[in-house]
Amino acid sequence: MFATMGALGLAPTAQAAQRDQPFRALSASDFTLTGRAAAKVVIVGGGIAGLAAAYELGKAGYDCTVLEARDRTGGRNFTVRGGDTTVDLSGTKQTARFADGHYMNCGPARIPQWMITLDYCRELGVPIEVFTNVNADAYLYNESTGMTKPMRYRTAKADVYGYVSELLAKATNKGALDKELTATDQEKLIEFLADWGELGDKLTYEGGSNRGYTTWPAAAGTPGVLRGDIPTASEIFGSAVGRYFSFEFEFDQAMLMFQPVGGMDQIPKALTRAIGADRIRTGAVVSKITDKGNGVSVTYTQGGRTKVVDADYCIGALPPNILAKIPHNLGSGVQSALEAITPSSAAKIGLEYKSRWWELDHNIYGGITETDQDVTHIWHPSYGFHGERGVLIGYYNYGSDADSYAALAPKQREERAVAAGVKIYGEKYRSELVSSFSHHWRQTPHLEAAWHYTPGGPDDPRYKPLNEPTGRVLFAGDWLSYMDAWQHGAFSSARKAVTALHTRVLSS
Ligand code: PHE
């Protein structure tokens, strides 16, 4: 009924909000009006792509069964709370001890406004709140360029933009742009630069309030004390703090960003409820996929027993590195395409503190500190402000940095991450710590990747057997999209598979 209301414009649906890539959600009338029967579909993988496929197919009445190897749905969408336990591929066991109400999103943690992930939050009734991706008061710290203390983002921006503006204004006034710009345009450019770089009367950069204060402006008698120690142009470019500024312009990272209230796994939980938990088999490890021409047979083991699901169609919604390990008869084109896509590493550690010292002592409420340390990114929580405790992400790193932390025991990971943080924030980074939990995707059973590298992009001809399969097994996942490493990629890929499957069923 909801879908029908949506089609009539009476209810907000994911489809209604999807302006650029129209997706027609399936509906029961597709079958009832054509006298056909909905087919049976087995979906391998209960991550976002698999769940989205089952959810969308369910709108038309398809008989879906989802096989999920882990004990919960969501795949890489994984939120850890106190009491949650993981065992990685090398047998390392961890149990999170976070206090009630605190969590870390080990996988996806931020959602841009334009992604269809938010449309699903709306449709499924998952409440969202702002995720702070950029914060003027977070820090930048590059030890390798000789910085001995961190710099506030706002201060770094004021200095970099200030000197760039001054230099460009000077060059313009010396006639360096006479071939490119008319005299009037040069005047406009200088007007812009003077404002952008907070330049003085002589078009020189001499600092200003954009850099911040050491004593904040307050009541009459307290005009504030501007932050001193203005670096020279040579010092500020030498520090390379400017390397972090383009991040906030990126199409997939620009503010505002959002997160589900209470943890990212509210999304798979809501999808699981909407699909019906009885349609999802957890702890079901698929061992064989056979296209029989007139149907598909999927073999799996669950609780030590081997079982088979027979269906009309199958959607393979596992990561390619895992799919490639499962015996199948789908052809060498499928196998070589799966093997061409390679897994990438990423990791996070959640550091639980007994006080929110970053709010109390540093006036930082959410946002990200950027470093050239092996911890890479330090995330301040975008929830629980002014509460007693908080969980900070002490590292979010990739590639060899993630792998080198994974090689350590959990306690050593914590110590190494804390040592990096102390350089930036001081001793409270160590003394206020109460617990930690670390997660490494390359070492996670049944996933073994944070995301993937797809040489040539998802439309490279070699992936045609995955994008346009001729048999009864279709594929879906973020790794088959232009938004790899985003739930949006998984949702949009699932929609594509669902549309292709439905078109086939309706034309058969
Ligand atoms: N989506 C993930 C994130 O935002 C991974 C990613 C990072 C993807 C940077 C693209 C760019 O952290």
Image (cartoon, helix red, strand yellow):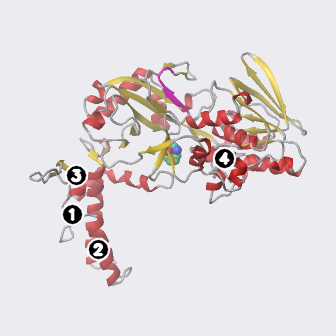
Q: Which residue is mark 2?
A: 191
Instruction: Tell me the SS state at disc 1.
Output: loop
Instruction: Tell me the SS state at disc 4.
Output: helix
Is the Cβ of the residue at disc 2 closer than 8 Å to that at disc 3? Answer: no
Position of residue 47 in the picture relative to residue 385 (left or right): right
How far across and down, in percent of the image, does residue 153 sit?
31, 49
Alpha-carbon span between mark 4 and mark 3: 45 Å
Q: Which residue is mark 4?
A: 480
When the figure is inspected, residue 344 is found, relative to residue 182, above or below; the finding is: above
Q: Which mark is residue 205?
A: 1
Establish whether ligand 1 lies closer than 8 Å to the Cβ of label 3: no
Q: Which kind of residue does numbered mark 2 sit on?
A: Glu
Alpha-carbon span between mark 1 and mark 3: 15 Å
Q: Which kind of residue does numbered mark 3 sit on?
A: Gly
Alpha-carbon span between mark 4 and mark 2: 46 Å
How far across and down, in percent of the image, does residue 237 sit?
29, 55
Alpha-carbon span between mark 2 and mark 3: 23 Å
Q: Which residue is mark 3?
A: 212
